[in-house]
Amino acid sequence: MKIVAVTACPTGIAHTYMAADALMKSAPKYNVHIKVETQGAMGIENQLTPQDISQADKVLIVSDIEIEQAARFDGMNVIHIPIEDVLLNVDKVLLIHCRK
């Protein structure tokens, strides 16, 4: 399964990057290929390309705030997840949301 994700938090510092790191480290255990874009204090990093998005089976928006450029995911299978859920139990998030 191919997943793209965007992580963002209100301050755009620690939680944004901690969530991205947790997703990238845990995804291989579930046979999930993932690319994570962060929207933090430094702006958008590791930006998802149109090709990344078009090839994805699902989009995970891991954020408690509005993300930038959300319209690019219109028509996709988008799942919104509170950032705290990923930080507390990334394995549970992946098990629930990343099964085919």
Image: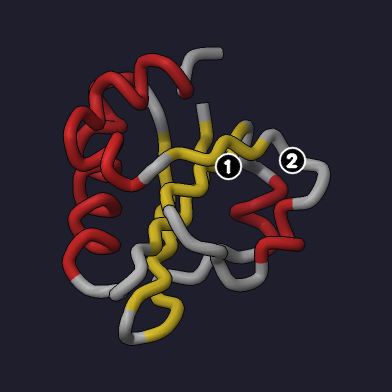
- Is 72 placed above or below 24 here? below
Q: Is mark 2 on a helix, strand or loop?
A: loop
Question: Residue beneath label 1, please?
Answer: 59
Q: Which residue is drawn at 64% across and 39% down?
A: 78
Q: Position of residue 91 (x, y in %)?
A: 24, 23
- Is 19 placed above or below 17 here? above
Labels 1 & 2 near each other (Cβ < 8 A): yes
Q: Residue at x 42, y 16 (%)?
A: 96
- Say which amino acid is labelled 2: Met
**Which of the two residues, 15 or 60, is positioned nearer the viewer here?**
15
Question: Spatial distance from mark 1 to mark 2, Cα to Cα?
Answer: 7 Å
Quadrant location of residue 37? Answer: bottom left
Question: Residue beneath label 2, please?
Answer: 76
How many numbered circles are shown?
2
- In the drawing, does residue 8 fall left or right of residue 74? left
- Is 53 placed above or below 2 here? below
- In the drawing, does residue 71 fall left or right of residue 66? right
Farthest residue, direction right: 75
Q: Residue 98 has which mark?
A: none
Q: Position of residue 84 (x, y in %)?
A: 27, 43
| Rendered-image quadrant of the C terminus | top right
Q: Earlier in the sequence, mark 1 or mark 2?
A: 1
Quadrant location of residue 75? Answer: top right
- Say which amino acid is labelled 1: Val
Q: Is mark 1 on a helix, strand or loop?
A: strand
